[in-house]
């Protein structure tokens, strides 16, 4: 089994096309096809189903893919280590981050990092917190940004960032239209929230704790929609389909533009959630990772995330 075969397999699986894989690998399509066929012969298993111009992974291919990715990731880290020793300014940085961080936080940090380190190759993977942590343990990524705290003997915390979980609404919602003489939204009673419909994108334990705190005082609000994509949940709230609950950083731009409004809650203690930057204890933190951590830390300290 050769590294070229594994790379052809992983790229073809990602692109769902031998032609596109050949372009990205700068080889001919017959070369990619030959590598895949040789790999299938060695594994004695069909990895792809050919469907016209597209391909799909078989069950065996799906099972093999994370292991092939892990092998290539470890190999690339080895090459990166040598490159760092030799140059100190180039390398490879693989980061895993939960989807909402990818959408609302990481872009300006990556931009600043890339401008300062143009020769570093950046690979960003997204997913749920549990998936991101597993990528870190499997050596698919070098740094993980997930909901914390993450407690694991192999993982250490590099940096944490806390943000408030807030209730928000469309400016047209009846609770948002109640204003005092100065035009500020009047605080909402907890009992009033229990009578409202919520459109939610769950945020793990923090979401459940928030809802339980409401239940302790009144009753649990009705969840009319549960949506996995944060942007879709926000879009539904903008159409006045209900209230929702998210970290402030996820709706900061919408609050500034007036597309959404925060609902202050009467006699309510702010609830914070934690986002952490994590790394494997038994792996060296390469130069690119150290520099990215510095950029991220400066962004957190400067309050760029609101």
Image: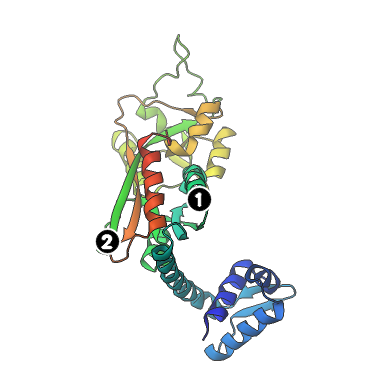
User: Comparing marks 1 and 2, which lies closer to the viewer?
Assistant: 2
Residue 9: x, y in percent? 58, 76
Residue shown at 40% from the left, 61% from the top: 142
Task: Give me the disc on residue 120.
Answer: none
Mark 1 or 2, nearer chain start: 2
Q: Which residue is mark 2?
A: 152
**Marks 1 and 2, how far apart in space?**
26 Å
Q: Which residue is mark 1?
A: 228
Residue 251: x, y in percent? 49, 35
**Compared with residue 155, is residue 198 higher up or lower down, i.e. above or below?**
above
Residue 16: x, y in percent? 65, 69
Residue 283: x, y in percent? 32, 65
Left/right placement of residue 80 relative to residue 44 reads: left
The answer to which image quadrant residue 4 occupies is bottom right
Residue nearer the viewer, 39 or 25: 25
Residue nearer the viewer, 139 or 292: 292
Disc 2, SS: loop
Q: Check the picture and name the quadrant holding the C terminus.
A: top left
Residue shown at 41% from the left, 47% from the top: 203
Would you say residue 89 is visible in this rendering?
yes
Residue nearer the viewer, 111 or 148: 111
Left/right placement of residue 227 relative to residue 288 reads: right
The answer to which image quadrant residue 295 occupies is top left
Residue shown at 46% from the left, 47% from the top: 101
């Amino acid at each position: 089994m050769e590294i070229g075969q594994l790379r052809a397999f992983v790229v073809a699986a990602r692109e769902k096309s031998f032609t596109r894989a050949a372009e990205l690998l700068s080889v001919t399509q017959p070369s990619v096809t030959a590598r895949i066929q040789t790999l299938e012969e060695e594994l004695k298993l069909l990895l792809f189903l050919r469907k016209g111009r597209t391909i799909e992974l078989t069950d065996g291919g799906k099972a093999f893919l994370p292991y092939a990715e892990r092998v290539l990731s470890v190999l690339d880290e080895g090459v990166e280590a040598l490159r760092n020793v030799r140059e100190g300014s180039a390398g490879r940085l693989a980061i895993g981050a939960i989807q909402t961080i990818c959408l609302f936080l990481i872009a300006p940090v990556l931009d600043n990092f890339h401008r300062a380190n143009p020769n570093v190759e950046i690979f960003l993977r997204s997913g749920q917190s549990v998936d991101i942590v597993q990528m870190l343990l499997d050596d698919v990524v070098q740094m993980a940004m997930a909901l914390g705290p993450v407690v694991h003997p192999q993982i250490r915390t590099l940096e944490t960032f806390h943000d408030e979980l807030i209730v928000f609404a469309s400016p047209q919602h009846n609770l948002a239209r109640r204003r005092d003489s100065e035009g500020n939204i009047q605080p909402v009673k907890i009992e009033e929230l229990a009578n409202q419909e919520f459109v939610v994108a769950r945020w793990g334990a923090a979401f459940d704790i928030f809802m339980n705190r409401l239940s302790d005082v009144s009753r649990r609000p009705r969840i009319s929609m549960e949506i996995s994509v944060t942007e879709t949940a926000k879009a539904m709230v903008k159409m006045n389909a209900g209230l929702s609950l998210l970290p402030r950083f996820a709706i900061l731009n919408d609050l500034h533009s007036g597309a959404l409004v925060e609902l202050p809650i009467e006699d309510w203690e702010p609830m914070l959630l934690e986002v952490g930057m994590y790394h494997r204890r038994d792996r060296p933190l390469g130069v690119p990772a150290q520099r990215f951590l510095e950029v991220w830390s400066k962004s957190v300290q400067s309050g760029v995330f609101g």
